[in-house]
Image (cartoon, rainbow, N blue to C red):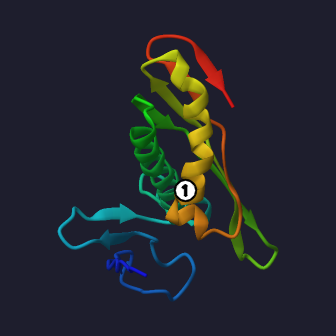
Amino acid sequence: MKEHLYTLAVEWTGNNGQGTTAYESYEREHVIRVPGKEPLKGSSDPSFRGDIQLYNPEELFIASLSACHMLWYLHLCATDGVVVTEYEDRAEGVLTLHTDGSGRITSVQLNPLISVTEGHMIEKAIRLHKNASEMCFLASSCNFEVKHKPTVKIAGGEKRSQ
């Protein structure tokens, strides 16, 4: 079995001089650093005193699932003769909170809109989403099903949904 190691650093940058003396005394800003890449500024969701202009962990989690699915999907299309010319996903995820303040992501639905070059590719293009979902490393790591509802169209023409 082959393994890949991923390393990164998350640095909290929200100390206003008082540290965490109170829930309201600190900002939720942080920086994600991956060696050799631009830093990514983050915060918590605005519901948890975060900055709406920065990425929050929940958004990044859903974006990671969407990107992993897309990359597997494009790979499978390339190897199965489906020529994709455009791909955009409008993913949605639900965070369910418990009365004690804990919670978890309970569902994610990917809603990709794909353009292919020819009409005979549409049915296979729709079917390949199931395979991509099975291959996605991140979806396989979740304790819930990552659903997908693709819409496939001929570049500049007819549309068909699952």
Instruction: Using the rendered view, name the quadrant where residue 16 is placed.
Output: bottom left
- In depth, the one of 15 and 140 nearer the eye is 140
Q: Which residue is mark 1?
A: 62
On-image quarter of the N terminus: bottom left
* Residue lying at 45% horizontally and 12% vertically, measured from the top left: 156
Residue located at (26% from left, 65% from top) = 39
**Left or right: where does residue 89 sit relative to residue 79?**
right
Rate crowding at label 1 as few (under 14), some (14 to 19) or many (20 or more) other CA atoms within 10 Å.
many
Q: Amino acid at mark 1?
A: Ile
Number of on-image labels: 1
- Give the x, y percent position of residue 14: 39, 75
Please give the name of the residue rendered at 54% of the width and 50% of the height, measured from the top-left corner.
Answer: 132
The quarter of the image holding the C terminus is: top right
Look at the numbered disc 1 and give the secondary structure of its residue: helix
Single out the residue that lies furthest toward the front. 80
- The residue closer to the viewer here, 103 or 144, is 144
Report the front residue among 140 and 11: 140
Residue lying at 53% horizontally and 65% vertically, measured from the top left: 138
Up/down of 147 relative to 154, above or below = below
Give the vertical position of 17 relative to 67 (above or below): below
User: x, y (%) of residue 136?
Assistant: 52, 59
Q: Quadrant of residue 4?
A: bottom left
Residue lying furthest top in this view?
A: 157
| Residue 46 in the image, given as x and y percentages of width and height | 56, 58
Q: Quadrant of residue 104?
A: bottom right
In the picture provided, is 98 more to the left or to the right than 20? right
